[in-house]
Image (tube, rainbow, N blue to C red):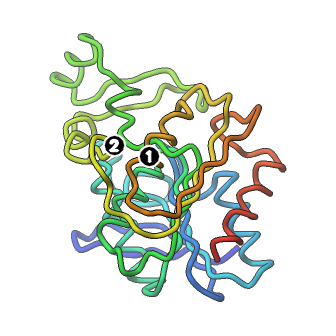
Amino acid sequence: MPALQMITRPDGIRLAARHQPGAGPTIMFLPGYMSDMAGTKAQALMAWAQTKGRACLLLDYSGCGQSEGAFDDGSIQRWAADARVVADALAPGPLLPVGSSMGGWVMLHLALAIPRRIHALAGIAAAPDFTRWGLQPTPEDTERLAHQGFTTRPSAYAQSPYRYSRTLVEASEAACLLHAPIPIEVPVRLLHGLEDTDVPWDISLQLAGQLASADVQLTLVKGGDHRLSTPADLALLAGTIESLL
């Protein structure tokens, strides 16, 4: 595994990253909500890239994993900016972002910010606009957001509840994309499990329809869950990335 590097944002916050040099474009993994580069898919993608001699870049968003910053200051826009800072510092050439769950939303904003550097995109249970269709604050949530600045929801992926900040919720409206055409022209591959109980597979279908690219393919995995982290799922991901390279 490549050595940990700390990349400093303009405001002084340091972001944790690992970069594997190799043939480009650089595969850049963007984690999901409250996840980081120590996750199964990120580690598997780095290991695969190393065996193939491919460039690969992992990072932790600010407030997540080994990066500095407060989690409650995070938003889709802020985390997309984090990804750009790390890419600019370690992989300034062409990129192939791979977005997992919320990382798929971050991926789209990164592609919109630096379109000329994006070679292709790959989404794994991509979850753009999840604050609209997945969070849907209750009156109790709204009160907590107003008075304590965050609310929580139980999660199947952690012992403690997931935390959602007022900053994230308020900024997310301006970050939503599925209501209009998305001007991304590069090849896009979307993977989604039919048994995903967290992000309905029709979200990927909506995304495919809104992307301007004429080269968009959606692969639905029978029996696949939200994580898509079984050996067969990871092999599918590797094959998908290889086809784009």
Do tag 2 and tag 1 residues touch (Cβ < 8 Å)? yes
Label 1 packing within 10 angstroms: few (<14), some (14-19), many (20+)? many
Residue 169 location (% of width, % of height): 26, 35
Relative horizontal placement of residue 178, taking residue 91 as reference (left or right): left
Q: Quadrant of residue 136?
A: top left
Does 49 sit above or below residue 136? below
- Height in image: 225 above or below 142? below
Image quarter (top left, top right, bottom left or bottom right) of the N terminus:
bottom right
Image quarter hosting the C terminus: bottom right
**Residue 95: percent from left, percent from top:** 49, 77
- Residue 207 marker: 1
Q: In the current view of this chain or complex, which residue is farthest to the top? A: 139
Q: Amino acid at mark 1?
A: Leu
The residue at the point 40 percent across, 83 percent down is 89
User: At which x and y percent is residue 3?
Assistant: 62, 77
For residue 29, side relative to residue 79 (left or right) = right
Q: Decide which of 45, 239 is in the foreground and name it.
A: 239
